[in-house]
Amino acid sequence: MIKAVRGTRDLLPPETALWNFVEAAVRDVFHAYNFHEIRTPIFEETQLFARAVGEETDVVSKEMYTFYVADDPQLVLAQAWLLKHRSNYTTIDRLGGYAFKTAFAAHMQNGVEVVVVGPSLNYFDLPTLRAEWNSSAPEAEQEPKLVVVVPPEEEQYARIHTKENDIELRVVEWPDKYEPPQSLTLRPENTAGVVRAYIEHKLWDRGLSKLYYIGPQFRRERPQKGRYRQFYQIGAEVIGPASAGSESPARDAEILELLATLLDRLGIQNWTLELNSVGCRSDRATYNEALRKALEPVKDKMCTDCQRRAVTNPLRVFDCKVPADQPIIETLPRISQFLDEPCRKHFEQVQEILKSVGVEFQLNDRLVRGLDYYTRTAFEFTHGALGAQNAILGGGRYDGLSESLGGPSAPGIGFAIGEDRLVLALKESAEAVQRKPDVYIAPLGAGMDREAARLARELRRHDVIADLGDETFRLKKSFETATKMGARYILIVGENEVKANAFALKNLESGQQVSVPRAELAKTIQSAK
Ligand code: AMP
C-alpha cells in the first residue's frame, strides 16, 4: 500500500472545516488592515533562499528540498560526441555497465575503443569496464583502448586522472543550445519569494505594499507533533520605499497589533509575545565581532555546528538546541548592549505604541530567529498548549533584504504563522464549525431521481445547502443517511408529491412534518435557519 510520505499528511473533513474557518477569519482581518493577497510559486531558484535566508542557517544548510532540472547532462554530451565522431567508426554499441549511462564500444577497421562520455566520471571504473567488455567478447584479440570524453571545463581535472591510468582524453563542446542544470528548491518560507516578486514587478511604484499569503512550505525537519515536512503558513509582509513609511516603528506596532487581534478573534488565549531588536547591519557587525571574541576560548567545548558557526556566523549559535551548549550560550553578550542610537530609539517607539494600544509583550534579548535577514524588531508568539513546538508564529523586520537580492532599498517587516499549530491551538471542534446540509432530498421510487434533481437545482439556486439521495434507497435508508450527515430537513420526493406539486418536508430535530408547495420550499427551509 502506498502511504503519504513521512512528515506529510492528508487533511480530511471534518478537520478541513477548521482550516477554512481559520482562513476565512484571517482574510477578514487582513482586509480590515488593507492587506492584499499575493501568491508566489511553490518552487524558486535555490540561490534565492541561499542569499535571502542565509547559507549558514539550519533551514538552508540542512532542511531544503532541492532538485535539479535539466536535460540529463551526460546524455546531452553523449549526443554531441556521437554527432561529431560517428563517421570515425564502423559500428558503435552501447555498453551496459550499470553505472555508465553513456559508455560505448566503438569499432574501427583496426581495433576497438571503449568510450565513456560524461562529466564527473569515476575514472577508476574505466579498467573495470574494459574487463567487462573483454569478458563479454572473448574472441577479441586486442585490448580495447580506453577513451574518456569530457566537456571543456573538466579537461584540466580529468587530465590528472587519465594520465595516471593510461586513458586517452578527448574534449567535446556542449551543444550551443544546452542550458546547464538549474537548481530549484521547494520554498521553505515565503518572505524571500515575496521580496523577489516585489523586485521583479517593481512594486515600489505602488508605494507601500501590504501583502499577505496562505500556503504550503517545505522543510526536511525531524517530524513530530506540530512539526511537519509540508506545513502551512499564513504570513504578511509590509514592504516599500522608506518614503512610503516602510521603516516607521508604527508599521512594526501595527503588524503586532494585527496579530494580537487575529489570535483574539480566533479565540486563542494565553499567548505570549516575545520581542527583541536584533539591530541593524552596523550593530550586527560589532555584535558579531564581540560574539566571535567571546566564543573563541569556549567554542571547542561546544557542538560541531557551533564550532563552525562561531567562525562563519556567530549569531546562529543562538539557534543551537544542544542542552550541553546552553550554559555557554547564556554567558554570551546580548544584542541589547550593542544597539546604536537610531535602533534603540526605533525599538523604544515600537514598545510605546504597543503599550498605548494595550498589546502585552515580554522583552527577550536572546531571541534572534533562525533566519539571517532579520534586522531591528524580531518577535515570536508562543502558546502554552502546544507543547515542545510552542512557537505559533514568528517574524521581524528585514530592512536590507531587497538590496541583498539585487533590488532597491525597501525596508520591510513581516511574519509567518504556522497554520498547522494555529489549528491545534483552536478551541472550536471541527464538528462545530463544519456546515451541515439544510436538507436531504430523498427520491422515492422509480423515475424520482429526475424530479429530485430538478428540486435540488431549484433549492441550491436559492442558497439552500442540499444533498441528494437515490431512488433505489428505501425510505428508512434515506432517513438514516440524512440523520447521519446532520441535515436539518428531509424532503420526500415520491410520485404523489410530484403530482400534487407539494412535498413532504420533515424537520429531523423536532420530528414535525408538513406538506409544502414547491414554490415555498426554499423560503420555508431558509426561514427556519
Ligand atoms: P519560521 O519561518 O521558522 O519563523 O516559522 C514561522 C512559524 O511557522 C513557526 O512559528 C511555526 O509555527 C511554523 N513552522 C515552522 N516550521 C514548521 C514545521 N516544520 N511544521 C509546522 N510548522 C512549522
Image (cartoon, rainbow, N blue to C red):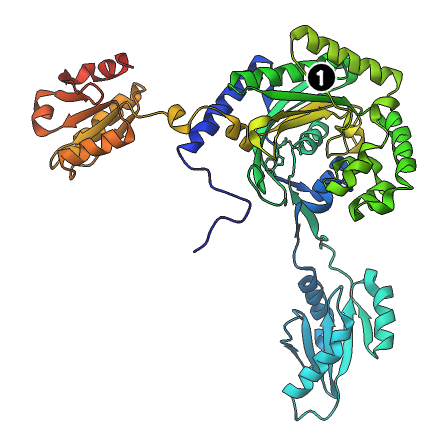
Q: Residue furthest top?
A: 356
Amino acid carrying mark 1 in the image: Asp
Count of all numbered marks drawn on residues in the image? 1
* x and y percentages locating residue 220 in the rendered image: 63, 45
| Frontmost residue, 493 versus 406 | 493
Tell whether 311 sits left or right of 425. Answer: right
Residue depicted at 71% across the width and 52% down the height? 179
* x and y percentages locating residue 32 in the rendered image: 56, 13
Q: Quadrant of residue 391?
A: top right
On screen, 117 above or below 180?
below
Q: Does the residue tagged 1 have its C-beta within 8 Å of any atom of ligand 1?
A: no
| Frontmost residue, 223 versus 284 | 223
Rate crowding at label 1 as few (under 14), some (14 to 19) or many (20 or more) other CA atoms within 10 Å: many
| Frontmost residue, 318 versus 56 | 318
Where does the N terminus fall, quadrant-wise?
Answer: bottom left
On screen, 284 above or below 316?
above
What residue is disc 1 on?
252
Quick one: SS at disc 1? helix
On screen, 181 above or below 428?
below
Tell whether 42 sits left or right of 177. Answer: left
Where does the C terminus fall, quadrant-wise?
Answer: top left
Residue depicted at 49% across the width and 48% down the height? 4
Q: Quadrant of residue 357?
A: top right
* x and y percentages locating residue 369 in the rendered image: 73, 31
Residue depicted at 74% across the width and 34% down the height? 371
On screen, 28 above or below 66?
above
Tell whether 167 sits left or right of 498. Answer: right
Residue 468 seen by the camera:
no
Q: Quadrant of residue 491?
A: top left
